[in-house]
Image (cartoon, coloured by chain):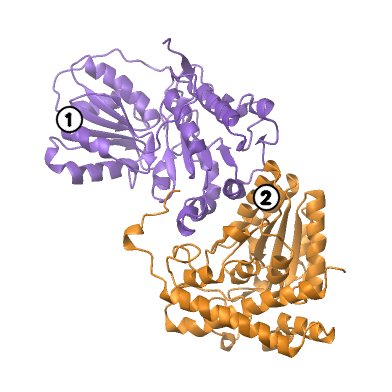
Chain colours: A purple, B orange
């Protein structure tokens, strides 16, 4: 079969169109879903195809909109709510934590709550402290939510379809720096299971557990390491809640080395949880001290100067792997240098 | 008004007595320490939910807050499942996971009550948005208290409902207190709630919430408007809780409210007002009221026995219902 590569944003758009065609009860709302920029083109053509009853712009009322999503899903709809930044959604913590996450449990499983919440995580171009928070770990602390974080276009489409047709509240975390990446995406409608992470690369020397945009960097690092005979097994936490680390444990039992990458800081985080559980389950198997690569525990600064060494990339991953595996030899590679450190590619010109 | 007739008023009285007697029985049995959850009684506030329950259909939906016993029973929620829920039993309406503050009975359109002030307001708007999009002929009632209008999400919900023309009735039961905090420390004295809300471009009315006839007229005016225009309405009903904010006791020894105020509202007991009216009209007599009461008390006793005998949820089911 010929490979069809789609941009991450095109994959999201395709999932929306296929889901809305498949089921009339799917609606899409959020600030800007039908504005000229169409949420980074992810909501292109939706209003034209499905009408303003099912695709509509809304007031800037994140908390009420979440409750409205809960109510409309309890009464038959499958809403997809969109926020151009995760940070804006923080207004809605009462509805998310006291409401959506608990509805099934506190009412004894009496009704379905099929609500999908798309949250875009920003980075670079001075997004700064309140436009680039990657708060998956905060949400992971709450029982009753499903949380997904696709790292490529294939997952972006399959996980969004799965989220829309799941009968629970699902947080769909999409990293802004993945929006312009490409990968193979089948044309048909398909869903990916919302039950556990995925193994993206098989390898025998070290297990790298990664998430979201960091998975991109780990794949670049793995390519270089492989050419020097070091094979990483990359496990992508594309489904992080419900948290199921079975694949991580079996991988670590095989590779006996572990590196965990986080898109946020590591204090009380998914990465530290992975490390802690792996220690408890695989203690005797570990050959080296596991490591975490995460962000400094400060708000993300805005300044072009201060963000220079703030984020980790494939070079940092290679360094960590070398340290963990006590590799002495020099690993030479041509640095894929970005002209500016604060943009994912030369086409990215912000402003958000 | 043709809806204010013998049949309807007797229905309202029945509901009011059911709510009053059930809550009195809860207050009586609460000190046995078997109902182990925070419980907010509706005694004194029976009229509005009894009227609304009488004049809405099962398919019409309803959400409420922490003080929801009257709303649940008024809408026709199962008595046995309700009492069992208070006892934390597996036969409870929420299978013992919710308690007094999380009641549900989808069979009669009581979608749910939640325990955070204003939390269920946008949920009600969402229920109604869904009715509108899917073309379901139903209205949604959102019960809220006077403190609810102080939360940001209240404004957000009103604004959304007005802007998007959502067929929903906001029912504010103003009982003047948020726990022990009077309205005077929470809202400016010269501003009435329904007038403030009216400024959001929504039809808004205020009525004494203890006089059945007035509540019926106001509610039906609102309901007709919502059904005809597919637009929201806000209603403010003044009423009063007799017991403490949370629990089975009276708390007037704490002197947080004026004795005269309580006496005034007790004199304006919604049940007495309706009974007197019905007797005056010769639509009912003391004998039939007593018969109605004893049949209600009998039902309540059966529900309590059922609840006490029911099993607790199984320990191994702790994780059940986390996901649907």
Q: What chain letter is assigned to the residue under label 1?
A: A
Quarter residue B121 falls in: bottom right
Asked if both marks, 2 and 1, belong to the same chain, the answer given is no
Instruction: Please indicate whether residue B135 sits to the left or right of residue B247 in the image.
Output: right
Query: Which residue lies at the image location 49% right of the left edge and 21% below the top edge?
Result: A188
Circle 2 residues within 10 Å: few <14, some 14–19, many ≥20 = many
Q: How many marks?
A: 2
Q: Is residue A242 above or below residue A159?
A: below
The alpha-carbon separation of the residues under discs 2 and 1 comes to 54 Å
Q: Circle 2 — which element? A: helix
Q: Is residue A323 above or below residue A170?
A: above
Quarter residue A159 falls in: top left
Query: Which residue lies at the image location 43% right of the left edge and 74% below the top edge?
Result: B36
Quarter of the image with the N terminus of chain A is top left
Query: Which residue lies at the image location 72% right of the left edge and 58% below the top edge?
Result: B169
Q: Which residue is mark 1?
A: A255
Quarter of the image with the C terminus of chain A is top right
Residue A161 shows in this picture = yes
Residue A131 shows in this picture = no
Q: Nearer the viewer, mark 2 or mark 1?
A: 2
- The image shows residue A96 at horizontal and vertical percentages of 51, 50
Q: Circle 1 — which element? A: helix
């Amino acid at each position: 079969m010929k490979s069809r590569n789609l941009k991450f944003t095109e994959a999201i758009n395709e999932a929306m169109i296929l889901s809305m065609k498949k089921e009339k009860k799917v609606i899409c709302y959020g600030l800007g879903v039908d504005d000229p920029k169409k949420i980074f083109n992810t909501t292109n053509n939706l209003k034209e195809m499905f009408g303003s009853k099912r695709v509509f712009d809304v007031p800037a009322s994140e908390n009420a909109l979440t409750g409205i999503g809960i109510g409309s899903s309890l009464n038959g709809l499958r809403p997809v709510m969109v926020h151009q930044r995760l940070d804006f959604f923080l207004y809605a913590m009462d509805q998310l934590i006291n409401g959506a996450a608990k509805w099934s449990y506190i009412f004894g499983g009496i009704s379905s709550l099929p609500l999908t919440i798309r949250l875009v995580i920003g980075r670079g171009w001075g997004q700064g402290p309140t436009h680039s928070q990657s708060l998956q770990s905060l949400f992971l602390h709450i029982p009753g939510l499903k949380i997904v974080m696709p790292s490529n276009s294939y997952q972006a489409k399959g996980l969004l379809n799965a989220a829309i047709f799941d009968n629970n509240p699902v947080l769909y975390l999409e990293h802004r720096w993945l929006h312009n990446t490409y990968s193979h995406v089948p044309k048909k409608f398909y869903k990916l299971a919302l039950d556990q992470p995925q193994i993206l690369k098989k390898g025998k020397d070290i297990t790298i557990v990664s998430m979201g945009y960091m998975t991109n960097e780990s794949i670049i690092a793995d390519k270089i390491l492989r050419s020097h005979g070091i094979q990483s097994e990359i496990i992508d936490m594309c489904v992080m809640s419900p948290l199921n680390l079975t694949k991580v444990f079996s991988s670590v039992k095989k590779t006996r080395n572990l590196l965990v990458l986080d898109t946020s800081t590591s204090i009380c985080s998914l990465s530290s949880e992975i490390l802690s559980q792996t220690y408890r389950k695989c203690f005797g198997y570990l050959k080296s001290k596991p490591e975490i690569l995460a962000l400094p525990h400060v708000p993300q600064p805005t300044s072009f100067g201060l963000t220079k060494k703030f984020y980790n990339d494939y070079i940092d991953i290679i360094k960590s792997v070398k340290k963990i595996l006590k590799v002495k030899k020099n690993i030479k590679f041509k640095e894929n240098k970005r002209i500016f450190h604060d943009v994912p590619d030369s086409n990215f010109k912000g402003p958000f | 008004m043709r809806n204010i007739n013998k049949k309807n008023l007797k229905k309202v009285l029945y509901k009011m007595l059911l709510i009053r007697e059930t809550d009195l029985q809860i207050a009586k049995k609460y000190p046995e320490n078997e109902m182990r959850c925070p419980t907010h009684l509706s005694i004194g506030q029976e009229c509005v939910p009894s009227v609304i329950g009488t004049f809405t259909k099962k398919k019409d939906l309803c959400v409420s807050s922490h003080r929801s016993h009257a709303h649940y029973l008024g809408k026709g929620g199962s008595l046995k499942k309700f009492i069992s829920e208070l006892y934390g039993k597996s036969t409870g309406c929420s299978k013992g996971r919710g308690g007094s503050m999380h009641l549900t009975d989808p069979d009669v359109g009581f979608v749910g009550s939640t325990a955070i002030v204003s939390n269920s307001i946008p949920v009600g708007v969402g229920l109604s948005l869904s009715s509108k999009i899917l073309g379901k002929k139903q209205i949604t009632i959102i019960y809220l208290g006077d403190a609810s209008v102080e939360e940001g999400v209240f404004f957000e919900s009103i604004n959304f409902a007005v802007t998007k023309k959502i067929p929903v009735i906001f029912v504010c039961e103003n009982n003047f207190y948020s726990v022990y905090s009077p309205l005077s420390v929470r809202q400016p004295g010269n501003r009435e709630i329904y007038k403030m809300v009216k400024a959001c471009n929504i039809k808004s009315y205020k009525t004494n919430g203890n006089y059945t006839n007035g509540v019926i007229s106001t509610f039906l005016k609102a309901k007709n408007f919502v059904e005809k225009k597919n637009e929201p309405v806000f209603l403010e009903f003044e009423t009063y809780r007799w017991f403490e904010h949370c629990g089975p006791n009276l708390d007037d020894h704490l002197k947080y409210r004026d004795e005269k105020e309580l006496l005034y509202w007790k004199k304006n007991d919604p049940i007495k007002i309706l009974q007197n009216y019905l007797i005056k009209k010769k639509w009912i007599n003391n004998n039939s009221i007593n018969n109605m009461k004893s049949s209600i008390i009998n039902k309540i006793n059966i529900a309590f026995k059922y609840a006490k005998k029911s099993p607790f949820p199984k320990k191994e089911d702790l994780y059940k219902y986390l996901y649907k």
